[in-house]
Amino acid sequence: MSSSGSETVRVNLAERSYDIQIGTGTLQQLGPLVAGGGKLRHVVIITDEHVEQPHALAVAESLSEAGAQVDALVVPAGEKSKSIDVAADLWERMLVIETDRRSVVVAVGGGVVGDLAGYVAASYARGLAFYQVPTTLLAQVDSSVGGKVGVNLPGAKNMVGAFWQPRGVLIDTGVLKTLPVREYRSGLAEVVKYGVILDAEFFAYLEQHVDEINRRDDSVLRHLIARSCRLKADVVEIDEREETGHRAVLNYGHTFCHALEAVTEYSEFLHGEAVAIGMLCASRLAERLGRIDSATTERQCKLLTALGLPVEMPEVDPAALLAAMRHDKKIASGKLRFVLPSRLGHVELVGEVKEEDVRGAMTGENG
Ligand SMILES: NC(=O)c1ccc[n+]([C@@H]2O[C@H](COP(=O)([O-])OP(=O)(O)OC[C@H]3O[C@@H](n4cnc5c(N)ncnc54)[C@H](O)[C@@H]3O)[C@@H](O)[C@H]2O)c1
Ligand SMILES: [Zn+2]
């Protein structure tokens, strides 16, 4: 693997600004990156059991070579590790290995490890320097950008957390070679989302590179990841702490998605699969409201299908989905609001949507 064609995305957040470095075969560059020309002391790597070998090991070697004393803390793989219990266990283990204010935390893993390690870094000793090495496509294009870190409460996802920006993010497309295909495709749903909400040209690029994407071509992946990170960073730079409402554009498809995930008890669909179905529902809703034509929905449907993602709402009770939507914190006001396209590459927040239209968008029935 070569590291040629590396790209850098700058996230501009005043004194919290940092770079996302995107390359291939670049895991070994983490040591020099964290050292930054200075002296490295103690680094705590947080990873999960699927990622430890070979990826976290390669990162650990690079940090050791750069002069760091490295400890690797491994958590079980899966969403269950995003809990206060696992965070508390990590705090204890960090105390035992004498982690102090000058120690650095490095997350090597998917979104679960990134959110968990970021939260532990934000809270231990009132905040430690933090780096991310995201190893799923979803983490590379979404969860490692924006500084949201946290854990779940039973029955309330991401309820406890912080905004804690990393000092740097290192993305190596090579690690995606070991990612199970379903996880890979799931990440692609968020990539398609960026095209729909912000960048029609990028959407067309994805349409034109389906084969390369499906065979995980490194050069196409570097571009696709860099563009996705840039688009998300543009949004985050305007609304870092989700205060102005601007960050809501990222929720395209997600109101339907969260309802579907809740009703199927998070066991039937990976997040990106539910996002794909949710985007199609949102697009059909936009059609019903006369905001877009059917060709715009059709293009999304075709691209998502070509990338191996589901697009059909399964047989679930629409009433249960509607009830779940009302529980979603994003519509806490009680009114149904949706992020809907007005054309490819542009979305708007639409309030006061009628329940019958939401139901129709999910079932494909009229009225
Ligand atoms: N912070 C944010 O802004 C943000 C945004 C989106 C999602 N998230 C969070 O991200 C989480 C989901 O992240 P995810 O989809 O990456 O799930 P994940 O971290 O559970 O990873 C999915 C699976 O892939 C394995 N894996 C990871 N990298 C691998 C590799 N290179 N090779 C082989 N296996 C590998 C993991 O061990 C796990 O089994 C959710 O908790 C979600 O809430 C956060
Ligand atoms: Zn998402």
Image (cartoon, rainbow, N blue to C red):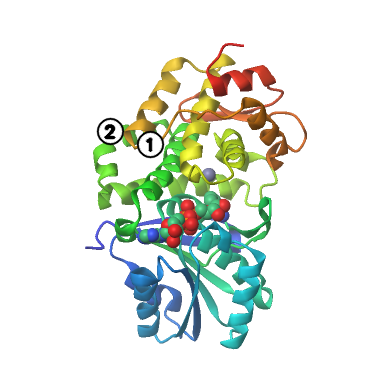
Residue type (three-letter) at the residue carrying disc 2: Gln
Mark closer to the chain start, 1 or 2: 1
At 72% across and 38% down in the image, what residue appears?
Answer: 327
Q: Residue furthest right?
A: 333
Coordinates of residue 289 in the picture (x, y in percent)? 59, 16
**In front: mark 1 or mark 2?**
2
| Crowdedness near tag 2: few (<14), some (14–19) or many (≥20) residues, C-alpha within 10 Å | few
Q: Residue furthest left?
A: 1
Q: Disc number at residue 270?
A: none
Q: Which residue was labeled with disc 2?
A: 208
At 35% across and 78% down in the image, what residue appears?
Answer: 62
Is residue 314 shown above or below 221? above
Is residue 85 shown above or below 195? below
The quarter holding residue 86 reads bottom right
Coordinates of residue 51 in the picture (x, y in percent)? 40, 66
Badge 1 vs badge 2, beta-carbon distance below 8 Å: no
Q: Is residue 204 left or right of residue 334?
A: left
Coordinates of residue 237 in the picture (x, y in percent)? 57, 50
| Crowdedness near tag 1: few (<14), some (14–19) or many (≥20) residues, C-alpha within 10 Å | some
Distance CA(mark 1)–CA(mark 2):
10 Å
Q: For the C terminus, which image quadrant?
A: top right
For mark 1, give the secondary structure: helix
Q: Which residue was labeled with disc 1?
A: 202
- Whether residue 255 is visible, yes or no, is yes
Residue type (three-letter) at the residue carrying disc 1: Phe
For mark 2, give the secondary structure: helix
Q: For the N terminus, which image quadrant?
A: bottom left
Q: Is residue 343 left or right of residue 64?
A: right
